[in-house]
């Protein structure tokens, strides 16, 4: 029985045309395909991707990484033409350069039932020197037509062995088949990193190999007595090569979605990083392997740990800042504020100091390493338990594997009364435990002076909060005269400082009017934009002409006025990736409306409470009427900054209910 | 003692030299009239263009800018471009602090050297030296000096003492030096009301402007060119990347361009010529033939920007375009012309500015201008323009990127000025028709269709490229005023012959009507405009406003209410009529159904600043009337 099934399956797969994934073996069937069978909307598809990376020994260059790339790409329509242009980054400027060779590429089209080939010539290949150490090699394929197939292959040599950059196993178009192979000699031990939501297998095997080389035997240089060049002798060493293989098929396309963090976090891919070397007759030299080891390596670097012991050039300045202060909390505060004002960030991120802490302190500017390692230094000088915390910004993706390259920013962490206070002195409007939104990316790694390290959470535990009080009066012409006072704390405060800081009143007014379309502010006053430790306070007043509607002798009032959301950000039917709010938040509104003379309330919206998930979010709506004054209070809370796709439908429903409730109306009738 | 004196002397000299220009480097000495509301102030600028050496242009720049904030950094412009035909001989920047004391000097080797290729270009040989400086304190002052030499004299950079928004100008001087026998032609505009001096000798002209207050950007204001002082200049003879050129008149200029840049790039292989001839041999008339060739082009090529030959001004040879099936606007227009030559149809390589603001070539300035190329085809007495870089654009369609502007046609007889297709108010039509039905639960359901013509057509083409999910997301975004919306049965029809785009779909909105007790309140027009349509408010607007293109936007809706309900009072019809536009609504009850029509029109024109508040008021009224509601009572 089992056998029969097997044969049937075999037959089925044979009826599909067999694809030959060798360069030049493009079939008519592949060219005839009009749309992708699994994803008819796709503009193009990677039919086959092959990457073969191997590290070999060459007598002249030592160990060299060679990567052989071959791809076959189907282009279904004009929008897929972008897949006819490819860019290869090439790093130069070291003692040896990377380079591309043996580039061969062909466009295949079907013309009158015949396969035509158009070769890429030199006039389609461009070398561009982007900057001193970074070139790109680009090529664009000739004669692209809807339905065509392009193939290219090339060899890429690199003297840099520490990483095999991420090999994508998933693209924004479907990927039908990929074969990835990486071979390295046993002496170079690599850590493999897998990424993405898609499962795939990696086959690891070993194979005996031999390195042949010639060496000079008997060479000596004996000073006064002359020298001998010795004799050349062929030698060989036996070794084991380790091979990693990934074979993956039918990978669906990635799609962009609103409210996502960096979607590259979810893309399937594989990369390798050198973790240690063990050459014959030599001790093990660790590069990376575990988070501990990674952090130790980073700490041991001259531009990181080295900067934390680089003398006390700021002693006198800091003594003045700390004069008379004994409370450790106050010390942290003063030092952080001092560091923020003393140095300006030059816009470059990095975990390592670029100019050096001393010089950055003196010049008043530097990269994030320069500034925050300075901050750690100063905090330690004041006797605080301060350490650097390395992290990866949202743009950079989440550091899922222990890798030195996964981190791109460093901040300072102080342990005080068992809590970790996080600080980033590159952000002038930031506060203690209030980091720029782009930094709220899962965990950071705190590295202690002895090189040991632990994870600390970067995601804020406290809610960003808005508290708004509205006092409104409806006059005899049915215009709404409204006074509003709002307070924004936590990340809301930070966001307001960013959006409103340095703007004059006119610009602040315009920005606010854009946020709440349809209101024209008479006056606006914003307080605490400079002081990140207090909530931002905004007061304004406005008249709203169409806040009140009259139909016949009835009057309709939208009690949330400009605060009611008009549309849900979640309109799509489906969701692939988590919704990422960045931080938990809570919006509270209390609105008091004095009704016009001569009218009475006919209908009032009902009170309501909606919840979402298990304590993930809630919305409360309470309304009452006393002596012709209506009071509404609402509270919307999201407790979890990340909402996984399985909860998306619930979130969408929740938002729809909230928005519908926020837009309900009070009906007045003439007495 | 001697040494000390010398040191003092050295220190003092540059300051003295500078003070002749009435300048110092401290931000404190800026006139508040120039810095109020400004992100930066141009304290001093001296630009010298020296054409006295045949075939060479030496440009010397000396600029001192005080920067008040991060936005003001863009006004420093410490940047110099170079390529195979030009080089930067000198470049330096010096930073001064608030008090005017020197803080830092940045030498040539510390400038960053990049390739100046923008995102849309695959390759160009232009490079750029740019200052990478992090200010630690604002305000600060920077002096930037640079000298470049070039073998291109075809572009005389214009002088714009007010060059951008939110920056004041204290002093700006602009000199053009040339051989007396090369007469300089000048077009100077909008000098009125500004303190500007001109000195002229046979070999040198110098313009000097003082104290120009900053201006703020305003919505729909006339272009910079039309508002602020500007000098444009040209010579009758020039060099383009070392190649000599002749101008003087558009005729001569066009002849030179045609002969030296275009003509020799048009050869096609005999078999290609035969293929095209064969393609059109049975077609009845010239237009049909040109259409067929245009379709052939659109099916064959794609747009790839590669800028190499003669500073990016010479098209890639037509034979190469045929072989590679790609090229930029020059290459593709030129290739199309070569194809038309093969079938004996006259056409003209056409140079213009491509942008949505209808920027024309300045017809008074006979010089290299423009940033785009299209092809004009002679069909009878008419010239039809073809956009050759797009695979979707219908035959002869211009859209807002190339419509209604002055362009230069290159003909074998010489250059000729022409104007591209204009879209009038009645051409630009967006028409929405919906048949909607409310059920007893307050849900709305119905059919929607939208027809787009004229300038409304081109944005719709992109719908063709969207997949089903992106397409429904597009409608959710577009109909954002309708909550809990679901769309289905989306049908798109792109009629490229008539240049009409039609969309059809079914929509369903849960809880569309708000329940009030037993009754319902519902907007009659679900596609009503929201407050976001209202133009921005200015407490003190300075500029006129421009409506670049007239247009009509219509809604026709039938709205049926459920059984067992009756309609409350119905809103009165509205008719607003202004110089710049009009708005009308009509409501008519027919049994259980309301027929609603609404027509919004804008009239092309430039309107005085005084009318701006009225323009806003007009939009406010439109939004209010658009959002009229029906009260639907239970019987």
Image (tube, coloured by chain):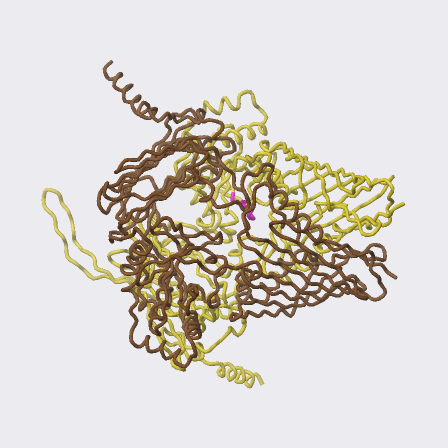
Chain colours: A yellow, B brown
The answer to whether residue A149 of the structure is visible from this angle is: no
Of the 4 image quadrants, the one containing the N terminus of chain A is bottom right
Q: Is residue A143 magenta?
A: no
- Viewer-proximal residue, A337 or A389? A337
Q: Which residue lies furthest to the right in this view?
A: A671
Task: Please tell me whether residue B400 is drawn above or below residue A16 in the rendered image.
Answer: above
Taking the spot 55% from the left edge, 20% from the top edge, the residue there is A324
* Apparent side of residue B430 relative to residue B177 in the rendered image (left or right): right
Question: What stretch of residues is rendered in magenta?
Answer: A438-445
Q: Which residue lies furthest to the top in this view?
A: B1
Q: Residue furthest left?
A: A225
Of the 4 image quadrants, the one containing the C terminus of chain A is top right
- Viewer-proximal residue, A283 or A13? A13
**Snapshot quadrant of residue A98:** bottom left
Image position, residue A123 (x, y; %): 30, 63
Image position, residue B182 (x, y; %): 25, 44
Image position, residue A169 (x, y; %): 47, 64
Task: Please tell me whether residue A78 is drawn above or below residue A230 in the rendered image.
Answer: below
The answer to whether residue B63 of the structure is visible from this angle is: yes
* Apparent side of residue A440 relative to residue B248 in the rendered image (left or right): right
Task: Please tell me whether residue A652 is drawn above or below residue A528 in the rendered image.
Answer: below
Q: Does the magenta stretch include residue A441?
A: yes
**Snapshot quadrant of residue A460:** top right
């Amino acid at each position: 029985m089992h056998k029969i099934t097997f044969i049937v399956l075999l037959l089925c797969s044979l009826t599909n045309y067999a694809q030959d994934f060798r360069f030049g073996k493009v079939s008519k069937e592949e060219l005839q395909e009009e749309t992708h069978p699994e994803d008819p909307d796709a503009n193009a598809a990677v039919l086959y991707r092959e990457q073969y990376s191997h590290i070999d020994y060459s007598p002249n260059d030592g160990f060299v990484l060679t990567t052989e790339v071959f791809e076959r790409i189907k282009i279904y329509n004009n929008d897929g033409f972008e897949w006819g242009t490819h860019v290869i980054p090439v790093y130069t400027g070291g003692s040896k350069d990377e380079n591309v060779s043996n580039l061969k590429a062909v466009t295949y089209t079907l013309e009158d039932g015949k396969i035509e080939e158009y070769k890429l010539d030199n006039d389609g290949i461009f070398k561009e020197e982007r900057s001193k150490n970074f070139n790109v090699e680009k090529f664009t394929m000739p004669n692209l037509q809807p339905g065509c197939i392009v193939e290219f292959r090339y060899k890429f040599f690199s003297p840099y062995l520490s990483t095999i950059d991420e090999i994508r196993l998933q693209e924004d178009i479907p990927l039908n088949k990929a074969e990835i192979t990486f071979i390295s000699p046993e002496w170079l031990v690599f850590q493999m990193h897998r990424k993405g939501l898609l499962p795939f297998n990696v086959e690891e095997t070993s194979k005996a190999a031999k390195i042949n080389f010639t060496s000079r035997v008997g060479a000596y240089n004996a000073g006064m007595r002359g020298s001998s060049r010795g004799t050349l002798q062929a030698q060989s060493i036996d070794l084991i090569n380790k091979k990693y293989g990934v074979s993956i098929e039918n990978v669906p396309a990635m799609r962009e979605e609103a409210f996502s963090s960096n979607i590259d976090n979810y893309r399937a891919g594989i990369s390798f990083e050198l973790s240690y070397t063990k050459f014959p007759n030599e001790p093990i030299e660790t590069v990376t392997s575990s988070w501990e080891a990674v952090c130790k390596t980073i700490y041991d670097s001259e531009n990181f740990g080295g900067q934390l012991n680089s003398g006390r050039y700021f002693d006198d300045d800091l003594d003045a800042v700390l004069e008379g202060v004994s409370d450790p909390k106050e010390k942290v505060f003063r030092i952080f504020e001092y560091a923020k004002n003393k140095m300006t960030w030059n816009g470059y991120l990095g975990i390592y100091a670029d100019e050096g802490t001393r010089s950055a302190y003196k010049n008043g500017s530097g990269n994030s390493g320069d500034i925050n390692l300075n901050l750690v230094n100063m905090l330690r000088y004041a006797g605080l338990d301060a350490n650097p915390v390395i992290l990866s910004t949202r743009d950079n993706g989440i550091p899922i594997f222990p890798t030195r390259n996964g981190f791109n920013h460093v901040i300072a962490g102080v342990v005080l009364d068992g809590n970790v206070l996080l600080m980033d002195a590159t952000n002038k409007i930031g506060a203690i435990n209030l980091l720029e939104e782009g930094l709220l990316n899962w965990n950071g790694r705190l590295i202690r002076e002895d090189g040991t390290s632990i994870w600390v959470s970067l995601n804020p535990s406290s809610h960003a909060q808005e508290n708004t009080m509205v006092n409104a009066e409806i006059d005899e012409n049915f215009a709404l005269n409204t006074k509003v006072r709002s307070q924004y704390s936590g990340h809301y405060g930070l966001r307001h400082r960013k959006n409103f800081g340095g703007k004059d009143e006119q610009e602040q007014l315009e920005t606010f009017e854009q946020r709440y379309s349809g209101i024209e502010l008479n006056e606006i006053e914003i307080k605490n934009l400079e002081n990140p430790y207090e909530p931002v306070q905004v007061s304004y007043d406005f008249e709203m002409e169409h806040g009140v509607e009259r139909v016949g002798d009835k009057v309709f009032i939208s009690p949330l006025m400009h605060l009611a959301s008009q549309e849900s950000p979640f309109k799509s039917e489906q969701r692939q990736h988590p919704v990422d709010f960045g931080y938990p938040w809570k919006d509270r509104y209390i609105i008091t409306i004095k009704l016009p003379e001569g009218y009475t309330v006919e209908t009032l919206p009902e009170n309501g409470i909606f919840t979402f998930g298990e304590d993930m979010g809630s919305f409360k709506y309470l309304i009452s009427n006393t002596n012709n004054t209506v009071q509404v209070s609402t509270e919307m809370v999201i407790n979890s900054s990340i909402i996984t796709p399985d909860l998306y439908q619930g979130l969408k429903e929740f938002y729809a209910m909230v928005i519908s409730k926020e837009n309900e109306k009070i009906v007045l009738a003439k007495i | 003692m001697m040494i000390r004196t010398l040191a003092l002397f050295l220190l003092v000299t540059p300051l003295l030299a500078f003070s002749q220009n009435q300048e110092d480097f401290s931000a404190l000495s800026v006139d508040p009239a120039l810095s109020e509301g400004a992100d930066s102030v141009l304290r001093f600028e001296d630009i010298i263009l020296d054409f006295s050496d045949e075939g060479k242009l030496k440009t010397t720049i000396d600029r001192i800018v005080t920067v008040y904030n991060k936005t003001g950094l863009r006004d420093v412009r410490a940047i110099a471009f170079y390529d195979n035909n030009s080089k930067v001989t000198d470049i330096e920047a010096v930073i001064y602090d608030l008090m005017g004391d020197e803080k830092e000097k940045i030498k040539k080797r510390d400038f960053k050297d990049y390739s100046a290729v923008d995102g849309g270009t695959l390759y160009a040989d232009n490079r750029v030296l740019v200052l990478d400086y992090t200010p630690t304190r604002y305000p600060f002052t920077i002096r930037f000096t640079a000298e470049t030499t070039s073998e291109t004299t075809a572009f005389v950079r214009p002088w714009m003492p007010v060059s951008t928004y939110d920056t004041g100008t204290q002093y700006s001087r602009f000199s053009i030096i040339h051989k007396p026998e090369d007469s300089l032609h000048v077009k100077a505009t909008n000098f009125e009301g500004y303190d500007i001096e001109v000195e002229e000798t046979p070999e040198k002209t110098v313009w000097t402007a003082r104290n120009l207050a900053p201006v703020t950007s305003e919505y729909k204001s006339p272009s910079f060119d039309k508002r602020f002082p500007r000098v444009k200049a040209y010579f009758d003879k020039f060099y383009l990347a070392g190649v000599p050129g002749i101008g003087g008149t558009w005729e001569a200029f066009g002849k030179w361009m045609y002969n030296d840049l275009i003509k020799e790039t048009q050869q096609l292989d005999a078999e290609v010529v035969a293929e095209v001839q064969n393609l059109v041999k049975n077609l009845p008339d010239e237009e049909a033939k040109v259409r067929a060739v245009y379709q052939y082009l659109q099916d064959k090529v794609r747009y790839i920007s590669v800028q190499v030959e003669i500073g990016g001004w010479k098209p890639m040879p037509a034979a190469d375009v045929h072989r590679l099936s790609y090229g930029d606007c020059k290459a593709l227009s030129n290739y199309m012309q070569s194809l038309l030559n093969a079938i004996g149809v006259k056409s003209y390589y056409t140079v213009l500015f491509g942008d949505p603001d209808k920027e024309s070539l300045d017809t008074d300035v006979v010089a290299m201008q423009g940033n785009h190329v299209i092809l004009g085809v002679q069909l009878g007495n008419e010239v039809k323009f073809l956009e050759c870089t797009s695979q979707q654009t219908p035959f002869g369609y211009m859209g807002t990127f190339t419509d209604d502007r002055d362009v230069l046609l290159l003909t074998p007889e010489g250059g000729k000025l022409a104007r591209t297709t204009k879209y009038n108010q009645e051409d630009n039509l967006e028409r929405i028709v919906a048949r909607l039905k409310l059920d007893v639960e307050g849900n709305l359901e119905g059919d929607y269709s939208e027809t787009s013509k004229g300038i409304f057509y081109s944005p719709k083409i992109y719908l063709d490229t969207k997949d089903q999910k992106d397409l429904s997301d597009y409608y959710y975004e577009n109909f954002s005023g309708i909550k809990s919306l679901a769309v289905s049965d989306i049908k798109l029809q792109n009629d490229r012959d008539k240049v009409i785009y039609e969309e059809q779909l079914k929509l369903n909105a849960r809880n569309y009507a708000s329940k009030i007790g037993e009754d319902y309140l519902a907007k009659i027009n679900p596609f009503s405009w929201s407050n976001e349509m209202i133009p921005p408010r200015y407490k003190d607007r300075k500029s006129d406003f421009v409506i670049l293109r007239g247009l009509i936007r219509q809604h026709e809706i039938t709205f049926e209410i459920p059984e067992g309900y009756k309609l409350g009072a119905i809103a009165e019809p509205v008719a607003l009529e202004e110089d710049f536009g009009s708005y009308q609504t009509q409501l008519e009850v027919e049994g259980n159904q309301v027929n609603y029509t609404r027509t919004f029109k804008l009239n092309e024109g430039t309107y005085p600043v005084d009318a701006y508040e009225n323009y806003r008021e007009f939009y406010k009224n439109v939004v209010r009337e658009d959002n009229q509601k029906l009260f639907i009572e239970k019987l």
